[in-house]
Image (cartoon, coloured by chain):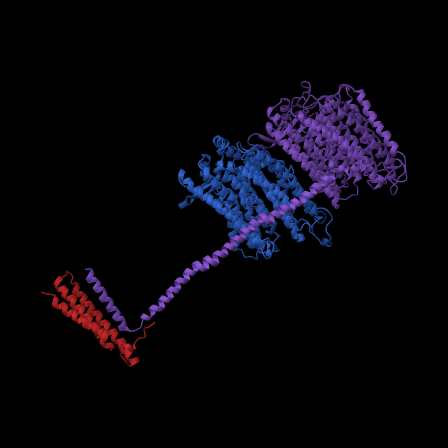
Amino acid sequence: MFRNLTLLAAEAGPVNAGDGGWWADTAGIMLVLPFVAFLLILFFGKRMKYEGGEFAVGALAIGLVWATVLFVMNMTGGVLDQTTFEIARIGSGIVFELGWVVDGLSIMMYFLVNFVGLVVFIYALGYMKGDIRVNNFFASFSLFAGAMLVLVGSPNLIQMIIGWEGVGLASYLLIGHYWEDLDNVRAGNKAFLTNKVADVGLILGAILVGIAIGNFDFAALSEASVNQNAELGAVAFVGGLLLFFGAMGKSAQFPLHIWLPDAMAGPTPVSALMHAATMVTAGIYLMARMFPLFQNLAQDARVYMVAIGAITLFAIGLLALVANDIKKVLAYSTVSQLGYMMTAVAAGGYTAGLFHLFTHAFFKALLFLGAGSVIHAVHSNNMSDMGGLRKYMPTTYWTFVVGSLALAGIVPLSGFWSKDEILATLGYEGYTAVMWIAIAGAFVTAFYMTRAVALTFFGEYKGHGEPHESPKLMTRPLIALAIPSALFGLLNIPGVSIPGIGNFTDWLAVRVVAMGDHHPEGINFGLAAAGLAAALLGIALGWMIWGKDTKTQKERDSLEIPVLYPLLRRKYYLDDAALGIVGATMGPVARSVDWINTYVIDGIVNAAGALTRGLGGFVYAILDQRGVDGFVNGLSVVADGAGGGLRKLQTGRVQQYASFFVAGAIVLAVVFVILS
Amino acid sequence: MLVNQFLVLSAALFSLGVYGLLVRRNIVLILLSVELMLNAVNINLIAFESVIRSADATGQVFAIFIITVAAAEVGIGLAIVLMILRNRRSANVDELNLMRW
Amino acid sequence: MEWFDSWGLTLIVFLPLAGALLLGLVPGDKEDILKRGALLVTLAAFGLSLVLIWLFEFGGGTYNTYQFEVNESWIGAINANYHLGVDGISLPLLVLSTFVMVLAVIYSWNHWEEPYNPKAFLILMLILATGMNGTFVALDLVLFFIFFEIVLLPMYFMIGVWGDRTPRKIPGFAKEIETRLYASIKFFLFTLFGSAFMLLGFLALYFKSGEFGERTFDIVQLTELGAMGSFTGTFAFLVFGAMFLGFAVKVPMWPFHTWLPDAHTAAPTVGSVLLAAILLKLGSYAFIRISIPILPEEAANWAPAIAILAVIGIIYGSLACLAQTDMKRLIAFSSVGHMGFVMLGIATLTDIGINAAIIGMVAHGLITGLLFFLAGSMSHRYHTREMDRLGGNMKLMPVMGGILAFTAMASLGLPGLAGFWGEFMALVGSYNPLDGLPLGVFRTSMVLGAIGTVLTAGYMLYMLQKVNLGEPKAEWDGHEFHDVDRWEMTAWVPLIILIVVIGVYPKIIFESTTDTVVSLIDTVFGSDVTASISSGG
């Protein structure tokens, strides 16, 4: 049943990758553990001290052991292995398999999901204490992590779809965690349905490319792409765009990003996990897995993808400037950063996009958890109720600032390096205009993060009560994330290879086939300076506007440029349009279908029934009662009359009878005589 | 031997019987007329038998049968007539139309 | 186990009927004996079907060969035989049928609708079981027809006697009519209407087969004749059409579906469950067993039409769901959509598509059966099915709410649960239908079907939001609701487990079906048939 594959790895010719041995063969445990935890929490969670959170944390902690071991093995030698087992085989060669891949890309994701997940889970133990339905929360949380691991470990498109929708389900459950309020339920519905719309693209795309070569396996698809397979080439453009459409949903690309800000309805740890390591990275991951297809066969599709990414990174970033809810600021920031990643991967910067995904996961999780810590303290999501928290919550403040600077791309924090690599890639691939948009985006990023930090942590406290620092269970995770947020950028300085372990680019390069993506050999100082300058300008301008304190937050936050401000406040009217269109059409359409069903189709059926009944009435009253029965009755009338006449013959006189008799005999005798 | 004279006799007797049957009103006379007709038939049968001489003497056998049946018939007939006379004090058939519908 | 080879199927089919006769001897007030007796009989039938799986030789068999075959002369005058047999296609459905029967009996342990009378109800259920089991193993058209029709009667009485008594205004009728009366009569007449045409088709085949030897009703022989291309031209076209009417009503395909929502809404819970879980499969099974193998060329001619109707059903059913206010009616309409996927799979005439149809049937049986169980239990407790009055069920009955959420997710085709494979593979199949079928029609169907999955998600979430989530309505203040009881749990947990297992490991169904289906396609769509289609024949 189990099939172990050792695949050839090659970037420039085969690399000397190991098969990971026991650790790779058993990596599936990592994928299964969260589901075990899910069941344990459902059945036994309520009896535990943290209502089942222990199981969730334990599952990820054990998973992290595997992830770390594999991560280190991959650093030092490269690991490449695939284990699959068949779950269905359909006649003419279509095989469905489950399993797990262990290569550079998936190891990076395993590590990310397990590490960030574990930190967020531990944080949630503190954050959710005393909340309602904590065991349900941790159950869904485990499901979330588990589905994401299934997704990133997937050796083929089918398992990917399973994980993909599993993530969607878990996000639905978590966004709607406080389901007593129907607004939260609607947010969950919106997320699920927006993603489901995108999933149509994923499923159709998977069918197109999978059927073309008769195999849904990523390894086979990559190989066919590199070998310029003709069948695959024929569907590559459409299939590629469909897959991209699927990725747009999960990775919240314009205009399918509308679900993501609403998804803030869930508890803050959910947002942290969703925006950092799970869910939104799924789309980027899909693009990376299918990279050979776009690189070799579907180049024509790329320009559209880059365009979408560019719109996302700039236009949605602007929305963060007007949001009052601190989580929404971060949410729009995530969408914008996803735009960066998508643009990079689409333009051909496989490593650049994934490196940004990697660094972003740490600092965005950090920012969300920091925001959660703040919300925990002031009991409000709105920045108008905050201010001056620097004094009350120092750990949260410092870690939040580190995260913000990393996000803004200030040297030497991690965001600087990854963003710089994206800029370099865009320049190299010839998307110069997009590159400048990305630099402008860096300015916007720094600008809104400055606003968030200023409004939250500087000036006087404007809320109620006396805020104080969160418990250690929540601040420790902040520190645990602040360190990688600051330092992990150094793992991939262009042209710098750390002795013995190489750099991030090398680790990702362990994969099935060579793909030939570009990564810069050295730092492009001009570009780096431009990006940095944009960021610094953003911080400076932001500080000028929001830095000084006023009586109310509203006064501070009063940069209301005409036209642009209302446009941004209404989120480009996209939500209104989407909800308006769906609301205005689906209801009436559904009702009219129901009407058709009741009055037309059923009407026909009922009319047929009525007609048959009418026909029956006709048959009975006219044909039967008057016709057939009339005939029968008529016969009886005739018989009756005839009898009345004949009975007169019977007089009872014997001699009369006798005379008839004799007359009859004479007649017969005469007839006899004549005939003879 | 000629058969004709027997047949003429028989026909005459039969006609007399028929006449009596249709015309007489007294029920006893009607019964007698019926006997006359039966005996006319008997003469016929005997006459033909004496000419044909069938192997098992069918004519004679039938004649004997008819005599027997006639005796029985007269027995029952007279019994009925007797009962009618007792009940009705009349032997006139015109008054006996009980067997109407 | 040699006796089992010849007697196994007969036992599985007629054991319930014998049980029904025995129950008839038990006095009606001995409820415990009746229930235990029924449970015993259904368990025995299920146990025998497990033995069947155990003895079944999987893999390798060519189509039109059956296992555990019985073939005895039955009505010599018309050459109708008592011919039973099972192959990889019918095996999962037969097991599903016996399995769901057991759960239905368990569930009815303490769920009785007015006017009570468990004896009559259990007897009807057992008769129903015989009809359903028989349909899946009958290999003679007369026998098939009889089993197919036997099913009608108990279901008619279930709906008509135990059904929903609320009066309803039916458009076109002057007076308000009790839902159960309207629904039961509609169900009976509608299905009978289709069956009449089906019988005509069967008779036509019987007489036509006389031209190639002895006249026969035997499906095996007719399949051989069909594969040789004996039935062609206008004759075959009309015969397929007649049988199509009969089967499509039962499936039900759009636009022959309108009996379904009424019947489901009116039927007692167990009736709805059996109707959804098994009765609907009789029609689609008949397409695979009878229409396609015997009239392959016509199947190819009709396939685009079937695909179009199926897709209309998917979209239309989902849209109609969004307009429903009655929970049970919503679930009923969802069946129209799901069976649309099954029929889309069949219409592709590929191994993938037909496999998709079979796993889709099994999954729909499990999932929608469970949904109807839940809807029944909830209306037992709330005494209403109006979704506007429900809400906050998760708060009042968390376990039931959780199971409802799970089942809704399964129903919307969440990957990893059973419903996914049928939908996904039907789409895969329609991307590449049988050679010669119009690609444009099928690929459009694929896209529309995929969009249908979004609508499916839409109405399922709508139902969850209306029923499960939010605060409970004020009218339920002070009401005590008891959560899922142990009989319900016993009936539902096996379904839940199976939904997950099939979702993660669909091989347990495909192991049985794949080889047979592949062989079916190879046998009936040999190169000459496909060639003649592509050349316009």
Q: Is residue C518 left or right of residue A117?
A: left
Residue in the foreground of this view, choosing between C84 and A246: A246
Q: Is residue C499 left or right of residue C188?
A: right
Q: In the rendering, at what x and y percent does residue C392 appear?
A: 72, 48
Identify which residue is drawn at 13% across, 61% down: B52
The chain that appears red in the image is B
Q: Is residue A252 above or below residue C96?
A: above
Q: In the rendering, at what x and y percent does residue A473 appear?
A: 81, 36
Residue with the most extreme front position: A563
Residue in the foreground of this view, choosing between A16 and A151: A151
Q: Is residue B3 above or below residue C390?
A: below
* Residue C323 is at least partly visible in this image: yes
Q: Is residue C127 above or below residue B86?
A: above
The chain that appears blue in the image is C
Q: In the rendering, at what x and y percent does residue C27 appear?
A: 54, 57
**Residue A204 quadrant:** top right
* Residue C123 is at least partly visible in this image: no
Could you tell me how many numbered marks the image carries? 0
Q: Is residue C377 left or right of residue C472?
A: left
The chain that appears purple in the image is A
